[in-house]
Amino acid sequence: MLSVIAAFFMGSCNIPAQNINQQTNTQRTESQASKASVPIKPKSEIKEAKLIAVGDIMMHDTQTRSGYDPKRQTYNFDSFFTPVKNILSTGDWVIGNLETPLAGKDVGGYTGYPLFNAPAQLLDATKKAGFNILTTANNHALDRGEKGVIKTIANIRDRKIASTGTARSAAEGDRILISTKNNISLAVLAYTYGTNGIPIPQGKDYLVSLINEKKIVKDIAKARKKGADAIAISLHFGDEYQRHPNPQQQQLVENLLKAGADIILGSHPHVVQPYKIFKFPGKNGKTRKAVAIYSMGNFISGQTKDYTNLGVIFQVNIRKKIPEKTTEIIGIKTMPTWVHRYTLNDRLKYRVLPLEKTVTQKKDSLLATSQYPVLKTYLQKMNNHLNPLNSKKKNK
């Protein structure tokens, strides 16, 4: 009897090895399938890029003459920007408002105010300084007519610099300039209040982008649809020589930021106006931050009226979270500048100086000791003036 029971148990445990392997393989496959069904969380990354912008890059007669070499009969304006090159070159997007046609000497000659036309060598100087985007929508865009607009754009493209605000065709005018740096895509749009009464040729509205709120709002939506993570808008508007924005500027800026723009870069008054930080309701209950500087003043010009020799380098840091694809402004900085007019080899010269560095180091060989206290006062006044218009008291 015991032998029968033993035989029974032995027989019941005698499972073929092949079946055991099949079961093991099935279990392993099911385990692998179970693991595969669990989604792998994408690695979280943070990308950052820096926007640097300046105001009007103008060319008066005295500036054009300052860069002329009579022996070689050539122009060179590199010295304009040499003192600020180290600052500008830190930007991923470096934007300036080119407020002069570069139409060539054969189109009315090289002239300053009121109808500007400068040598294209100005572009060589801007590129060497670090500029990679130029806005061209301003009241002097048509100073040399349609031909001037077309030639200016061609000269800019020849230097591999991007531009926006004027166009050579309707198709070119419909394009949105989007520049991607460090995986962050920035759309740059540009518009002007007018063209000093010079009419845009009939049927060629694309030549110069005029401020039209409804169109700008559509362009903002278009930029987002094309994948822009952030949108910067250059607005050539406001009252000349007024150091504070008018109500129309303030309303337009607020409307465009509410419509989805992130950064407004103002120009035209030729003097610096303050900047303001805005906060709007964002996605998932979060706050969306935006910023506008109403006027960055003159970056370089031959003007001598009060405050026209002072400008600002405006810096905005942009951060993007991946895979969330959320973008935010994380840092805003202003660096006041001053246009130094000086004489070298019996010739009037120009250059842009960063005020804080100049005042702190006091090592500039072209400045007299007596000039430093004056520049220090300029710096203090500019820093106070640029403080954001956020307090209720200031907004009254």
Image (cartoon, helix red, strand yellow):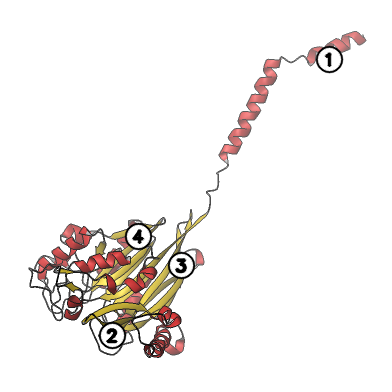
- Asked which secondary structure carries label 2, the reply is loop
- Give the side of residue 192 with respect to residue 226, left or right: left
- Asked which secondary structure carries label 3, the reply is loop
State the residue position of label 1.
Answer: 9
Q: Name the amino acid type tagged 1.
A: Phe
Disc 1 and disc 3 in contact, CB within 8 angstroms: no
State the residue position of label 4.
Answer: 224
Write the residue at 46% across / 85% down.
Answer: 391
Q: CA distance from mark 1 to mark 3?
A: 72 Å
Nearer-N-terminus badge (1/4): 1
- Asked which secondary structure carries label 1, the reply is helix
Write the residue at 80% across / 12% down.
Answer: 11
Question: To which quarter of the image does residue 224 belong?
Answer: bottom left
Locate the C terminus and report the quarter of the image it occupies: bottom left
- Asked which secondary structure carries label 4, the reply is helix
State the residue position of label 3.
Answer: 282
Q: Nearer the viewer, mark 4 or mark 3?
A: 4
Q: Across the whole image, how many numbered discs are drawn on residues?
A: 4
Q: CA distance from mark 1 to mark 4?
A: 74 Å
Q: CA distance from mark 2 to mark 1?
A: 104 Å
Write the residue at 61% across / 29% down.
Answer: 29
Q: Name the amino acid type tagged 3.
A: Gly
Nearer-N-terminus badge (4/3): 4
- x%, y% of residue 41? 55, 48
Q: CA distance from mark 4 to mark 2?
A: 36 Å
Disc 4 and disc 3 in contact, CB within 8 angstroms: no
Q: Is residue 310 visible?
A: yes
For this orientation, the residue located farthest to the right is 2
